[in-house]
Every structure is written in C-alpha cells, then in structure tokens.
C-alpha cells in the first residue's frame, strides 16, 4: 500500500502585500515569486524508512509542510494512506515532528504531552499510561515535571519525538530529526527510527546529513532546488562496484613515488608518506608489487565504494540536470 | 496490532465527545438567548437592594439556577471538547505570562491609590472613586485583550508551535476558536479580579472614617473629656483588619450578585457592559492577528476600539449631513439630493455600521449620574452577533493561510 503519494506537487511562494507570508527563501524585490517545489511525484510504501534528502533550500521541508497542511500546494495532489489531505481520520494515525521543534515552554513535560493527547481525543487513562511509556522510551522520565523552558536542544528533540508517537501512529513524518544533535543524540534518534520500522510503522524523514540517512534508509529521494533529482533504493542509486583504491605507502624515494604515480589518478606526498589513488584493481595491484620490490612499506590499502555523499556531489554539485528534465533518461 | 485497538478506541471516544460538546454548545446558546429574551438582564446578577451598608443576601432562584447551569455548561465545554482543551491551554499560557501580572499590579495600585487621591477631591468623593475604578477596569481590560491576546496568537505562529497543532486531528477553526475562548476567559478573570478589588476598596473606604476610629480609640471621661485608651494602637489595627475582612467578604458577595447596594448594582451593570465590549475587542484582536504582525494588530485593535467608542458621533454625522443637505438643497426626500451628498451620507452610515458600536455599550456616565438603570437586550444581542461575524471572518482568513 502506498502510505504517502504525491502527484505533481508544486509550491510557489508569493510575497504577501501585507508582509505576512514571505517565502522561505530570500526574495529579491523584483522577483517576488519563489518556486520552492516543482512537480514532485513520489510514493512511500508501507513499512519502509524513506529519506527525503537534499541540500538546504531543496524543498524537503516544503514538501513535508504541504503533507501536514501547514502550507497548501499551488498545484498537484497528495494522498496520505490513500486519502486526500485534510482527512482528520488520517491525521489520527500520523505522527509529525517539525524541524527545530519549539513547544510551549511554559508547560511541564507531561503537561505538554497531556495537552497533545487531548487533541488526539485520547481518554484520560490511556493518555496517562502512554505518556509514561513514551517518556521512558525517549529517556525523559526524570524531566517529566520540569518546564520545557529548561530543556536542552536534545531534550526538546526527544520530547518532540514523544509527542509524535503519542497516538501510536502508522506513519511517522520527521523533518530533520537529527539536526542540531551531538553524535550520541544522532545515534539515539537513529535507533528510535529503526525501532519504529521494527514495530511496523512507516517512517518518512528529511535530512541533509547524508551519512545518517545512508545507514538507515530503505529508499531515498534526492531533491535539488525544488526538483526531484532521483529516487530509489540505496543499491539502485549507488554503484555497487568499487570506485577507487587508496594506497598509502612509506619509505620510498621521491623518484620511486613518481614512477608509482604515473598510473594513479592522484598523488599526495607528506612527511615521507604518499597517498596514491587508483581507478582500477590492476594498477593498484601493480603498485603494491612495485612498492615491496623497492623496499617500501605498505601502510594501508582501502577500496572505496561510492557513498551517498559522493553520489550527491556527482549529481548535484556536478551540475546534473534533474531527471524530470532529462527526457527519457 | 496494539496500534489498531487504541486507534479505534480513540475514534469512538471522540465521536461520543463530539455529541456531548455539541449538546453543551446548544444548551449554552439556548440559555444565553433565553436570558436575553425572557426579560430583565439584571436578574442574572441578583436583585437590587437599597443601602450600601445593609448586608442582604437574596437568592433569585430562577436567575441563580440559570447562572449555575451556564457555568456548568461552560466548564463542561472546556473539559470535554478540543476547542476547550486549546482554550484551557491558552488560559494557562496567559496565566504563566508575567505581562499579565504587571498589568494587574498597576491596576490594583491605581485603584488602591484612591485611598489617598480621594483627599484631593472636593466633594463627590464616591463618584470620583467609582469613576477611577471603572476607568481602570476598562483600560486594563483592554490592555490584556490587546497585548496578551495578540502575542498569544502570534507566538503560536512565530515559534511554530502551530506546526504540531495543525498535524493533530483538529480543524483550524477549532484552534482559532480555542484561542479566542481561552483569551476571553483570561480577560474575564482579570476583569473579575479587578472588580473584586474595586468593590473591596469602596467598601473599605466607607467603613474606615476618621470619626469611626476616633470613636473607638477615645474614651469619654466623667467630666466630658476624651482620653486615649491604653491599647489604642491595637484597637485601631484590629478594627482595620476586621474591616478589611468584612470588605473582602462583601466584595465577593457583590461580585457574585448576592448583595447589592444601588451603587454596586450599577457598577456591576457597567462591568457587564465592559465584558460585552471586551468580547468584541478580543474577537477583533484575533481577527487582526490572524493575518498581520503583532505591532500592526495592536495598532489596528486599539484604533478600532477608539473608533467604536466614537461611533455614535459618526451616526450623528450621518444624520446631520442628511438634515443639512435637505435644507440646503430644499429637497423633500433622499432621492432628490445630489449624488455627492447621497454618497457622503451613505458612507457615514456604512462606516458607523461596520465599526463596532461600542458607544452604546458604554454606560459609565449613566451609572454614575442615574439612580436606577435599565439594561436592554439589544447590547447583548448586538455583541454576540458582531463577535460571531468577526470570528467567522477570522476563520475564513485563517483556514487557507500558509503558516510561516
């Protein structure tokens, strides 16, 4: 089942004459329209972790805002759980955590969760039990009676996660859940996301931290300047074959290194060590053999596969055209 | 899956709750209209008695029962509906905001200061105190509605707390109405506290006079001379404390509508009229802040309030324009007037229609200079209708808005 489906979703921000609705992106005086999202068509299947990736200003948050009805789409349609947006029955089964969440800081932790539980229409008893369970899950049991004012950024993110799980949602939408967190916090969020999938929930999240996404996503969509560049599973997007080999050697004369470097893509020399990068397996094996012959020492030899980051730089940084415009490609 | 069971339970639970909420709303509306339509509005606040000093507690079974029902219905509405949840949370936010206490602090200082300032007034002290107190209630009530009210809605957008609210299964209109009722609750609580303190000051001052205290602390000797009693200080202090306690009790009674003198009766009516006025002003604050920035909203709201207070003048202008142009152009009917005169008159009429008629709700001078007062149904109906229209427009604007 398609849990999330968007068809040709577009959003154009127009500066309001009363000065209320500025687009997210800085607009020049003469250019008052900003196309934040162009013809986004994708779908998220049940039970998968779907990553919405892209640099800042790519339209990730805009897409999520439209799905959550914080903004309305200029064109296009979107469906959640097979129903058009705005269906309250669907909203009962969704959890949402916005980017850099900020909550009512005059409320205590449990008061806040209790208030949101009321909005879900949960009965009193169920609310209490669920809040206790969730505070335990996100590790905030000790802070339940502290006002949110005193929460650190990480605690804020965690109480945000708790509020989006209150209703035991089938679909969880997280906007930049790991931004602003330290490595430990990022790992915790990652673990929670993985756990959500184990519990059979669908997770849609956006991120610009690619390494985090790489580790947990089943499928990703890559956005750039409001357009969908590519979508697919990790294996489909990244070439499985080894991209390059990095060889670090030491104890060689400069002339020897120069000779080795003739077949390499790049050579970096520093403090008696040399980093040589080769494009194919044959030449790296040849280099290793010659180093040993010349009495040099092999410090390390690493085959490097393409990471999402490399892919990203190749696609986006290299000025690639988005797929939709590339015709049949 | 456990998710399924909780989900379905909450669905059926909220269905039942919706019916309860709707029923409560209907009852409230019915009662409001009944009260307004079945006669004297005064009845809600007990029956008038004579003499400020005489303590009479009178129950008016019909009115009291009705007020209790209204109170219960409001409470149920707050507890059982989602609008109520948001309203209570809004109230909580306002109550935990320091600005509110500053406003309240100044109001109480100003009213309390009348103990001193009354001595500057030559004659008609009571009227002076009443005027000062009422102005305080009106002004600071407006301050709360404008400054606390506007920041409450704006904060929600600015700090993006609205994001998570919108993702919950509630309609946007429920959010806006929740904000409105929460704000109104805050304003009314503040008005009630100020009124209580006002009654307290009035009562206290009527009890504490130089003569009374002298009577207590001096003893008349056999030779007709007065001598100070030994424990005069203690007698004085205990009398002051006793009076304060009695005044507080009496103030609470007056506020609840059980014991009225002619003055408190009139003041209570004025305060109720202020409440109606604030109902409109709060709705306007919500309307403006639903599409504009806080500074602009505050300016708009205060300006509309001032325009509203001058509304009768606008009406008079329309009338005078009509009369004058008729005379000048020696016309017999409106249709005979020149087009420009017609446009002017219609414009003045239009403005006085659109701008809230707060003038008709302002009965302060009548309360001060007349012994008995009449309360009409018209202001109540007018306020409810006007507020309804303003809220409807706010909802229409808010419904399709992109949040920043």
Image (cartoon, coloured by chain):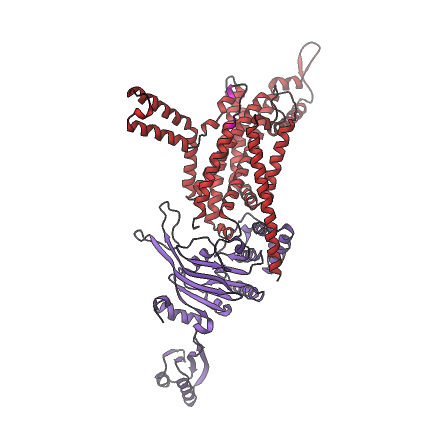
Chain colours: A purple, B red
Q: Position of residue A207 (x, y in %)?
A: 46, 63
Left or right, B133 with reference to B213:
left
Q: Position of residue B98 (x, y in %)?
A: 53, 41
Residue toward you, A151 or A174: A174
Left or right, A302 with reference to B191:
left
Left or right, A301 with reference to B235:
left
User: What are the residue bounds of the magenta stretch?
Assistant: B368-377
Quadrant of the image containing the N terminus of chain B: bottom right
In the displayed structure, A270 sits above or below A53; it is below
In the displayed structure, A194 sits above or below A273; it is above
Q: Residue at x 42, y 34 (%)?
A: B304
Q: Position of residue B199 (x, y in %)?
A: 58, 27
Instruction: Look at the image and tell me whether residue B359 can be seen.
Output: yes
Q: Main secondary structure of the magenta part?
A: loop
**In the orientation shown, which residue stands out farthest toward the bottom?**
A293
Residue A273 within the segment the image draws in magenta: no
Residue toward you, B210 or B312: B312
Residue B374 within the segment the image draws in magenta: yes
Residue toward you, B400 or B300: B400
Residue toward you, B337 or A284: B337
Instruction: Look at the image and tell me whether residue B252 can be seen.
Output: no
């Amino acid at each position: 089942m398609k849990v999330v489906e968007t068809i040709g979703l577009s959003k154009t921000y127009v500066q309001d004459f009363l000065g209320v609705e500025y687009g997210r992106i800085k607009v020049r005086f003469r250019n008052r329209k900003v196309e934040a999202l162009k013809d986004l068509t994708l779908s998220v299947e049940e039970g998968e972790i779907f990553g919405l990736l892209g640099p800042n200003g790519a339209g990730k948050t805009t897409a999520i805002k439209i799905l959550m009805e914080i903004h309305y789409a200029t064109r296009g349609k979107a469906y959640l759980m097979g129903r058009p947006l705005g269906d309250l029955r669907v909203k009962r089964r969704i959890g949402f955590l916005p980017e850099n969440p900020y909550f009512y800081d005059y409320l205590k932790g449990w008061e806040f969760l209790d208030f949101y539980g009321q909005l879900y229409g949960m009965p009193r008893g169920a609310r209490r039990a669920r809040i206790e369970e969730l505070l335990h899950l996100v590790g905030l049991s000790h802070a339940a009676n502290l006002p949110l004012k005193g929460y650190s950024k990480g605690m804020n993110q965690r109480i945000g996660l708790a509020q989006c799980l209150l209703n035991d949602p089938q679909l969880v939408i997280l906007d930049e859940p790991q931004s602003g967190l330290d490595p430990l916090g990022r790992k915790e969020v990652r673990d929670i996301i993985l756990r959500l999938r184990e519990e059979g929930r669908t997770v849609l999240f956006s991120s610009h931290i690619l390494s985090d996404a790489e580790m947990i996503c089943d499928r990703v969509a890559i956005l750039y300047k409001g357009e969908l560049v590519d979508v697919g599973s990790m294996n489909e997007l990244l070439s499985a074959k080894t991209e390059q080999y990095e060889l670090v050697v030491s104890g060689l004369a400069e002339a020897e290194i120069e000779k080795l470097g003739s077949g390499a893509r790049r050579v970096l020399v520093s403090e008696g060590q040399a980093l040589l990068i080769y494009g194919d397996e044959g030449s790296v094996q040849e280099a290793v053999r010659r180093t040993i012959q010349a009495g040099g020492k092999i410090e390390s030899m690493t085959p490097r596969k393409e990471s999402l980051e490399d892919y990203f730089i190749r696609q986006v940084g290299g000025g690639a055209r988005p797929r939709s415009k590339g015709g049949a490609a | 899956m456990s998710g399924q069971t909780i989900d379905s339970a909450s669905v059926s639970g909220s269905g039942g709750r919706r019916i309860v909420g709707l029923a409560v709303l209907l009852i409230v509306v019915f009662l409001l209209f009944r009260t307004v339509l079945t006669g004297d509005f005064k009845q809600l606040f007990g029956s008038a008695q004579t003499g400020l000093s005489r303590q009479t507690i009178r129950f008016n079974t019909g009115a009291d029962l009705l007020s209790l029902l209204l109170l219960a219905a409001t409470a149920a509405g707050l507890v059982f509906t989602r609008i109520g949840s948001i309203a209570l949370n809004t109230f909580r936010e306002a109550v935990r905001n320091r600005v509110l206490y500053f406003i309240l602090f100044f109001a109480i200082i100003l009213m309390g200061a009348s103990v001193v300032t009354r001595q500057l007034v030559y004659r008609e002290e009571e009227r002076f105190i009443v005027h000062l107190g009422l102005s305080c209630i009106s002004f600071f009530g407006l301050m709360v509605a404008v400054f606390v009210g506007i920041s409450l809605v704006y904060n929600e957008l600015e700090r993006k707390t609205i994001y998570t609210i919108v993702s919950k299964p509630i309609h946007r209109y429920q959010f806006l109405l929740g904000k409105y009722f929460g704000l109104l609750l805050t304003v009314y609580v503040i008005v009630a506290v100020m009124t209580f303190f006002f009654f307290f000051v009035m009562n206290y001052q009527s009890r504490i006079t130089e003569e009374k205290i002298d009577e207590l602390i001096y003893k008349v000797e056999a030779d007709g001379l007065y001598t100070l009693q030994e424990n005069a200080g203690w007698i004085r202090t205990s009398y002051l404390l006793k009076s304060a306690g009695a005044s507080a009790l009496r103030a609470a009674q007056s506020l609840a509508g059980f014991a009225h003198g002619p003055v408190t009766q009139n003041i209570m009516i004025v305060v109720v009229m202020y409440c109606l006025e604030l109902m409109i002003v709060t709705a306007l604050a919500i309307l403006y802040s639903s599409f504009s920035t806080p500074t602009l909203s505050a300016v708009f709201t205060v300006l509309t309030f001032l325009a509203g207070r001058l509304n009768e003048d606008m009406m008079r202008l329309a009338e005078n324009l009509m009369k004058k142009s008729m005379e000048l152009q020696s016309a017999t009917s409106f249709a005979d007037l020149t087009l420009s005169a017609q446009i002017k008159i219609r414009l003045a009429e239009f403005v006085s229609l659109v701008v809230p008629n707060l003038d008709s709700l302002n009965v302060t001078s009548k309360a001060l200079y007349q012994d008995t007062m009449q309360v009409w149904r018209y202001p109540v109906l007018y306020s409810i209708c006007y507020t309804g229209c303003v809220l409807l427009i706010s909802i229409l604007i808010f419904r399709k808005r992109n949040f920043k």
